[in-house]
Structure formats: structure tokens, C-alpha cells
Image (cartoon, grey):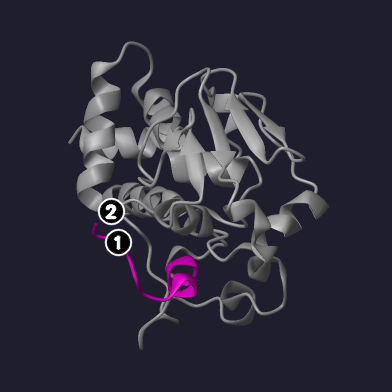
């Protein structure tokens, strides 16, 4: 499966803001955005005014990097959202939120979406009692995400019980059982990321 394998901090610097791709490191002084706020590259210190297209493109790139999705899959999600009833932008973000790697992160079972994707790929989770190692799987209300018994013994997983995580209303987390449940579909208010989805809709509507 294709995925971005370059330095995560470079992506944050390119967007000029913290995307929280490296978990706890992003909250420390080691964060590259705090240390070097310029755009990567030899011309990074230059400031230029973006066109409307440039603003739309940057918003699309930012959301892609938040969720760790490459262009083809991102475009497919948008096409899926267009076919659904309701507001296309809201539908689009709802689909991204329902990705299994994002749900693992939102439940507090991973420090970042990137780590959540890695844990899913390594087979540490089950979905409704069945093997689930595909990060892009979309969850539905009623689904139960559990950490495998064998995986519960690892030091990384044991640390989860000591952390306090705010879980969105559409999810329920049982830290003692290391289990989560999808109780509803996510709504726009559940997504606290600084995203202007209308810019992405405008970009793809060109």
C-alpha cells in the first residue's frame, strides 16, 4: 500500500502549522514548527500571496496530511461524499473520521493518526471480533474495536491505561478493557481540526 515515508515534521512546516503527526513530540520544544517556522527548501523564507486556487490547494494538502491519505484515495472519498445526501463537505469529513486508523487514535489507543495506522497494519486490533489490519476500513455505528489479547501485554499498550484522553461523543472507550465502540455517526461539531472544507469542495468543483 502506497504511503508517505518522508519526514513528518517537513509536512507541518510546509503547511505552516502543527498537524500533530508525531504525537507527544508536537507538544514539546522539539517540534520543528516551533523551532523553524519557515517553509522547507532554499526559498522557504520568501513570502508570497496565494491565489484563490493556491488557498484551496493548501487546504486540501493540509487535510490529506492530517489524515495520512494520498491523492487517489482522497479523491475517491470526495466522490463518495458527493453521491451522499446532505452537505458534501460534511459528508467528506465524516468519511475521513470513520477510517479505522483515525478511530484508533480518537479512542486514545495511539498517540497520533500515524501511529494508529502503524498499529492497525501490524494487526493489534480486531473489529467486531475479526482481524482488522486495513487502516482505511470505515467503521459504522455498533462496531466494536478491541485490542488483541496478545497485544495487551506489550509495554506500549499498557501505557494507555495511565493516560487521560477526551473521546468524541460518537465513540465510547473502555480503557480497562482496552475496547472502543462506535455509538453514532460523527457530526461536523465532533471534528475540532481547523479545517475549511468548503475550500476543498470549491477546488474539486472547478
Q: Residue 84 placed where, x, y %?
A: 29, 15
Residue depicted at 35% across the width and 54% down the height = 61
Asked whether 71 or 55 is in front, the reply is 71
Query: Is 175 inside the magenta-drawn segment?
Result: no
The mark that comes first in sequence, 1 or 2, is 1
Q: Secondary structure at mark 2?
A: loop
Residue numbers of the magenta segment? 1-13
Between 184 and 149, which is closer to the camera in this rendering? 149
**Is 79 displayed left or right of 109 in the figure?**
left
Question: Disc number at residue 70?
Answer: 2
Q: How many marks?
A: 2
| Nearer to us in this view, 168 or 15 | 168
Q: Is residue 132 above or below residue 61?
A: above
- Confirm or deny contact between disc 1 and disc 2 (CB under 8 A): yes
Query: What residue is rendered at 44% in x and 52% in y?
Result: 123
Badge number at residue 3: 1
Kind of element beneath mark 1: loop
Q: Give the image location of residue 141, x and y in percent.
A: 51, 18
Q: Is residue 172 visible?
A: yes
Tell me which residue sits at (37%, 51%) in the image.
64
Residue at 58%, 73% in the rendered image: 33
Crowd band around label 1 with a 10 angstrom C-alpha radius: few (<14), some (14–19), many (20+): few
Q: Is residue 44 left or right of residue 108?
A: left
Amino acid at each position: 500500500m502506497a504511503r508517505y515515508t518522508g519526514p513528518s515534521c517537513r509536512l507541518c512546516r510546509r503547511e505552516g502549522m502543527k498537524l500533530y503527526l508525531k504525537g507527544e513530540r508536537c507538544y514539546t520544544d522539539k517540534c520543528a514548527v516551533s523551532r523553524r517556522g519557515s517553509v522547507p527548501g532554499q526559498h522557504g523564507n520568501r513570502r508570497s500571496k496565494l491565489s484563490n486556487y493556491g488557498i484551496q490547494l493548501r487546504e486540501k494538502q493540509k487535510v490529506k496530511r492530517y489524515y495520512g491519505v494520498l491523492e487517489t484515495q482522497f479523491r475517491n472519498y470526495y466522490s463518495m461524499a458527493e453521491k451522499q445526501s446532505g452537505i458534501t463537505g460534511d459528508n467528506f469529513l465524516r468519511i475521513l473520521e470513520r477510517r479505522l486508523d483515525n478511530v484508533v487514535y480518537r479512542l486514545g489507543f495511539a498517540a497520533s493518526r500515524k501511529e494508529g495506522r502503524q498499529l492497525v497494519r501490524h494487526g493489534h486490533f480486531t473489529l467486531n471480533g475479526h482481524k482488522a489490519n486495513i487502516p482505511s476500513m470505515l467503521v459504522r455505528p455498533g462496531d466494536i474495536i478491541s485490542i488483541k489479547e496478545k497485544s495487551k501485554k506489550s509495554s506500549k499498550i499498557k501505557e494507555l491505561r495511565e493516560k487521560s484522553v477526551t473521546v468524541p461523543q460518537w465513540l465510547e472507550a473502555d480503557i480497562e478493557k482496552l475496547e472502543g465502540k462506535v455509538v453514532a455517526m460523527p457530526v461536523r461539531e465532533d471534528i475540532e481540526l481547523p479545517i475549511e472544507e468548503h475550500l476543498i469542495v470549491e477546488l474539486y468543483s472547478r
